[in-house]
Image (cartoon, grey):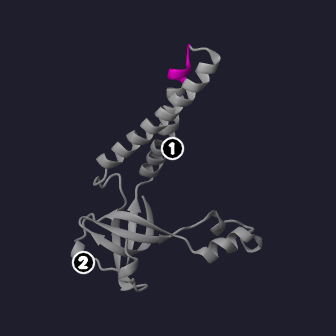
């Protein structure tokens, strides 16, 4: 399980939106002090908002601005990355091969492009369908692992998603 700390920015029914600070490879790089990329990433201070399931916690016990710890299983990250990146690409290659094979050269190119486009779209659609199926599954989503009593920063209600 990978754990991350963040700040609650919104409370929905059955889930939270948690803002975490985006980390870069610069944090572990030996050339951090002499690199312009490191300085640029520190100046921009990018953040991510993640939808987190409540798990064993009650929604009433969590407040906006509260610091929380979320847990994400490692296998979810690997399988999710493979699904999101590989399935559309494989479907595009398959579509190009199916529609482009067995035709003359000019027609083959056009039908290969059409097949790749249709395959890419269908791959994205399959990813979206799978995402909708696993929307509430605690085994496949980030889950609230802990809370702290102190509030690290105030949250403006106007900045909530």
Q: Which residues are magenta?
A: 97-102
Q: Residues within 10 Å of mark 2 (few under 14, many from 20)?
A: few
* Element class at badge 2: helix
Q: Residues within 10 Å of mark 1 (few under 14, many from 20)?
A: few
Residue at image location 40% in from the left, 86% down from the top: 154
SS for dot 1:
helix
**Picture residue at 69% right of the left edge, 65% below the top:** 29
Q: Which residue is mark 1?
A: 85
Q: Name the disc covering residue 74, or none.
A: none
Which x, y percent locates residue 47? 50, 70
Give whichever of 29, 10 is nearer the camera: 10
Question: Residue, x 60% and y 74% (percent of image)?
Answer: 44
| Residue where numbered disc 2 is placed | 61
Q: Is residue 101 left or right of residue 63?
A: right
Q: Position of residue 17 (x, y in %)?
A: 36, 68
Q: Quadrant of residue 53?
A: bottom left
**Residue 143 location, quadrant:** bottom left
Q: Main secondary structure of the magenta part?
A: helix
């Amino acid at each position: 399980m990978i754990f991350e700390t963040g700040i609650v920015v919104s409370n929905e029914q059955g889930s939270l939106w948690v803002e975490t600070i985006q980390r870069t490879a610069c944090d572990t790089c030996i050339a951090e002090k002499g690199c312009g990329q490191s300085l640029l990433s520190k100046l921009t201070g990018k953040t991510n908002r993640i939808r987190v399931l409540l798990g064993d916690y009650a929604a009433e016990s969590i407040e906006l601005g509260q610091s929380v710890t979320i847990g994400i299983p490692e296998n979810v990250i690997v399988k999710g990355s493979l699904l999101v990146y590989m399935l559309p690409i494989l479907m595009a290659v398959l579509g190009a091969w199916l529609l482009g094979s067995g035709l003359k050269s000019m027609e083959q190119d056009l039908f290969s492009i059409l097949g790749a486009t249709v395959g890419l779209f269908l791959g994205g659609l399959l990813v979206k369908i799978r995402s909708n199926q696993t929307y509430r599954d605690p085994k496949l989503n980030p889950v609230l692992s802990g809370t702290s009593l102190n509030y690290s920063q105030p949250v403006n209600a106007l900045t909530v998603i």
